[in-house]
Image (cartoon, rainbow, N blue to C red):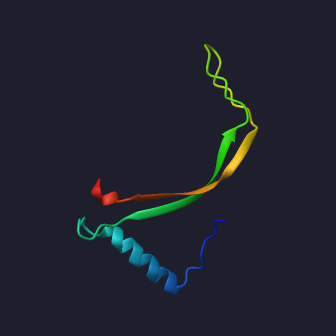
């Protein structure tokens, strides 16, 4: 759930530490990386989708079989280009 934190002095100090990392010049010996994680469902189609035809989009049935969950992690080094 998304929430806006209370802006305490401690929160602002920690926020400024993070923002200062992004202001630093690029240094390959001390890279700045961003990491994000997302949980996702692994789904399988109950019926094969029908392919596109002239004048008709691809059709996908709304029924699915749940095949578990997975966590997807993405890491980028924005200043490396």
**Residue 9, position as x, y percentages in the image:** 50, 86
| Whole-percent x, y for residue 77 in the image | 34, 60
Viewer-side residue, 20 vs 55? 55
The residue sitting at 73% across, 43% down in the picture is: 65
- Residue 46: quarter of image: top right
Tell me the quarter of the image containing the N terminus. Answer: bottom right
Position of 52 relative to 36 (above/below): above
Decide if residue 59 is on the left or right side of residue 31.
right
Instruction: Tell which residue pokes out farthest to the right in this image.
Output: 63
In this view of the protein, which residue sits in the foreground, 61 or 15?
61
Q: Is residue 4 left or right of residue 18?
A: right
Number of numbered discs present? 0
- Residue located at (23% from left, 69% from top): 29
Residue that sits furthest to the front in the current view: 67
Residue placed furthest toward the top: 54
Residue 32 point in image, percent of width and height: 33, 67
Q: Quadrant location of residue 21?
A: bottom left
Of residues 78 and 64, the one nearer the viewer is: 64
* Residue at 39% over, 71% down: 19
The image shows residue 36, relative to residue 62, as above or below, that is: below
User: On the picture, is 6 further left or further right than 13?
Assistant: right
| Residue plotted at (28% across, 57% down) | 80
């Amino acid at each position: 759930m998304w929430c806006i934190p209370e802006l305490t002095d401690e929160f602002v100090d920690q926020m400024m530490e993070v923002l200062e990392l992004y202001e630093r010049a690029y240094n390959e010996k001390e890279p700045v990386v961003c990491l994000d994680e997302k949980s996702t469902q692994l789904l399988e189609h109950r019926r094969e989708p029908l392919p596109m035809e002239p004048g008709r989009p691809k059709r996908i049935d709304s029924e699915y079989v749940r095949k578990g969950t997975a966590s997807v992690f993405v890491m980028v080094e924005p200043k490396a280009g």
